[in-house]
Image (cartoon, grey):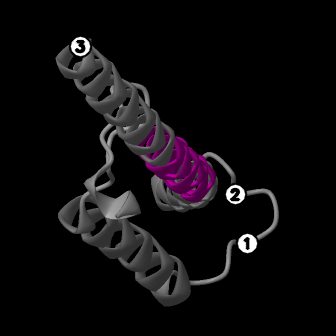
Amino acid sequence: EGSDCRSPTHPPISTRHRKMKCARLLAAVLLLAAAPPAAAGVEADPLNKVVSLLEDLSAKVAADGEKEAKAYQEYVEWCDDASKNKNFEIKTATAKKAKLEAVIGKAAGDIEAS
């Protein structure tokens, strides 16, 4: 039901995209774990700069993941709401159709009787 919904403002998130982000995050964590501890006052060292950049990247990937999860949850809620609204519209239209068919049948009977 809700999985068939499509919205241009909330496109579905691909599993491949998530796996790629997880792989990048894992690589960053592994590099951080393998890096030797930084000595005090050696911040200009290229290795420390790389570690710092990886830490920043790791934080950005985590933040992106949280934003993506929130956007996906909003998309799921939108799909659920749209599905409920369409089901209600279908039930309402079906009931209206039945009433109109009854009116048409009665009118046809009145015409034949006169």
Q: Report the predominant secondary structure element of the magenta stretch.
A: helix
User: Looking at the image, can residue 57 be seen?
Assistant: no
* Residues marked 1 and 2 touching at CB (< 8 Å): yes
Q: Please, what secondary structure does the residue beneath circle 2 have?
A: loop
User: Looking at the image, can residue 9 be seen?
Assistant: yes
Residue type beneath disc 2: Val
Q: Residues within 10 Å of mark 1 (few under 14, many from 20)?
A: few
Q: Where is residue 85 drawn, in percent x and y?
A: 54, 42
Magenta residues, start to end: 69-90
Residue type beneath disc 1: Ala
In the picture shown, does residue 77 fall above or below 10? Answer: below
Q: Where is residue 17 drawn, in percent x and y?
A: 25, 58
Q: Residues within 10 Å of mark 2 (few under 14, many from 20)?
A: few
Q: Residues within 10 Å of mark 3 (few under 14, many from 20)?
A: few
The image quadrant that residue 112 belongs to is top left
Which dot, 3 or 2, sits closer to the camera?
3
Q: Which residue is mark 3?
A: 111
Dot label at residue 76: none
Q: Which residue is mark 1?
A: 39
* Residues marked 3 and 1 touching at CB (< 8 Å): no
Q: Which of the two labelled residues, at mark 3 and mark 2, occupies the earlier sequence position?
A: 2
Q: Which residue is mark 2?
A: 42
The alpha-carbon separation of the residues under discs 3 and 1 comes to: 99 Å
The C terminus sits in image quarter: top left
Q: Where is residue 67 drawn, in percent x and y?
A: 61, 48
Which residue appears at 33% of the width and 54% of the height?
Answer: 13
